[in-house]
Image (cartoon, rainbow, N blue to C red):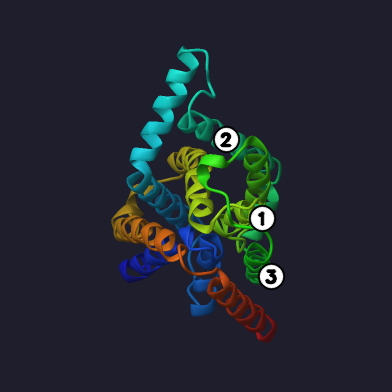
Amino acid sequence: MTILQSILLGVIQGLTEFLPISSSGHLVVIPYLLGWQFQAQDVFIFNVLVQVATLIAVFAYFWVDFLEIIKAMLIGLLQKSPMGTQSARLGWYLVIGTLPAGVFGILLKSSVEKAFSSPLATGVSLLFTAALLVIAERIGKRDKSLERINWLDAVWIGMFQILAIFPGVSRSGATITGGMTRDLERPPSARFAFLLSIPIMLAAGLSTVFDLINLPDPGALLLTYIPGFISAAVVGFLAIRWLIKYLTSHSLYIFAVYCTLLGLAVIGVYAFR
């Protein structure tokens, strides 16, 4: 992988991790469409680094919310009133929403690893993402704020996050769909989706970092990948800010159209190759 490829893929990761168009799918599809051939170890190391970069972007954007939630949860436990405040309730709802994807992620790990090497499966999953985004716009009243979320909403959104285990199915798209089908407004649904991504991304990042340590001489590639890491973190932060603002007055249909076109393009190229 060259430095230019690293930067380009970092930008793509930063954009697509938070826009509802699937980052994992793009990291499979873009090299495939451009004919880039990378060693499996190189791809693994790069994916670990850019995933950590986008996790940093989430923390950077939501650090005030995150600290308030942690503080409220700890105070609630000490006062034996864990659900006493809205911030504490939100924290526990994030925990509840994380459990389904965490359990299924462990159970389906081998299937997920195989899917990551299949452009065809990724193309089909992008079409599925497009369908989810259309469903999000067609179902739900969109009259509920984040303050009114309850445990059933959290479980429902968490079940949607399971779909994002496979590349091509957008995590943000799936969880935003889950929120909107439970009547959440678009921006609060996106906000909950991004906060919900923190535990899963943190767990996945720690897991893969431990795997990375066991690889022979991973440091030799880091100089090439650092520019991609930086670009993923910066672009990811900007993508979060832009999407939340965009969803205050726009629908998800444009992302559905994009996923449909890209999915069909990938399937078409795969068929002709």
Question: Which secondary structure, mark 1?
Answer: loop
Q: Is residue 40 visible?
A: yes
Q: Which residue is mark 1?
A: 181
Q: Are marks 3 and 1 in contact (CB under 8 Å)?
A: no
The CA distance from mark 3 to mark 1 is 23 Å
Q: Position of residue 169 (x, y in %)?
A: 62, 61
Q: Which residue is mark 2?
A: 93
Q: Position of residue 233 (x, y in %)?
A: 34, 55
The CA distance from mark 2 to mark 3 is 31 Å
Number of marks in the image?
3
Toward which corner of the image does residue 177 lie, by quadrant? bottom right
Residue 160, numbered circle: none
Q: Amino acid at mark 1?
A: Thr
Q: Amino acid at mark 2?
A: Tyr
Q: Which residue is mark 3?
A: 124
Looking at the image, which is closer to me, 210 or 215? 210
